[in-house]
Image (cartoon, grey):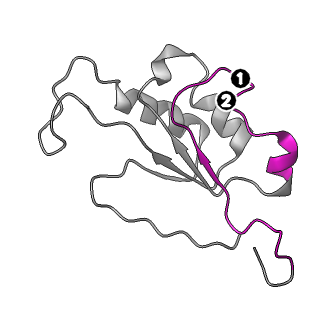
Amino acid sequence: MSEEDPDSVAFRIYYQDAVAAPPACFAPNALIRERPVDVAILVPATFDQVDWHPEALVENLQPRSVLLGHWEDFFVPIDEPTKSIFLTDVRHFERRLERVFDGEWWRPDKGIEFRFPTGR
């Protein structure tokens, strides 16, 4: 929001908690034209259940930055190395993301704080 236009969007975040079938997971084109996504929080945990993730989301959202969320292994404490056979191959997700997204992205570790500028 700005002083000139209190109804304007100062910062847009897209948060994905679980994979949903398109078009339910996509932002409406009119919304993206109004203001693209500043930060998309994408979930690698179930990306291998569909063949379009993360590529189609990146194309739709056109995010400036991407944070990976829900990538950790829930079957071991976060301070221990992941050993679970149930864990998604997060490196495979990262390689696919890098093929379609040339902006900054992060897989945050515990206790990391992010600050983003609100202006484009």
Q: Which amino acid does label 2 sit on?
A: Ala
Q: Which residue is drawn at 57% across and 26% down?
A: 53
Bounds of the magenta segment: 5-33
Disc count in the image? 2
Q: Mark 2 points at which residue?
A: 56
Percent position (x, y) of residue 112? Answer: 32, 61
* Amino acid type, callout 1: Pro
In space, the residues marked 1 and 2 are separated at their CA atoms by 9 Å
| Residue at 19%, 22% in the rendered image | 84
Q: Is mark 2 on a helix, strand or loop?
A: helix
Q: For the residues labelled 1 and 2, say whether their Cβ atoms are less than 8 Å apart.
A: yes
Check disc 1 and report the residue beneath it. Answer: 22
The residue carrying pointer 1 sits among few (fewer than 14), some (14 to 19) or many (20 or more) residues within 10 Å by Cα, namely few
Q: Is the magenta stretch mostly helix, strand or loop?
A: loop
Residue 41, percent across and down?
53, 46
| In the rendered image, the vertical position of residue 36 relative to residue 18, given as above or below | below
Inspect the magenta stretch and tell me whether residue 103 lies in it.
no
| Quarter of the figure with the N terminus | bottom right
Residue nearest the viewer, comparing 114 with 56 = 114
Which mark is first along the chain, 2 or 1?
1
Query: Residue at point 80% right, 84% down?
Result: 3
Question: Residue, x 43% and y 65% (percent of image)?
Answer: 114
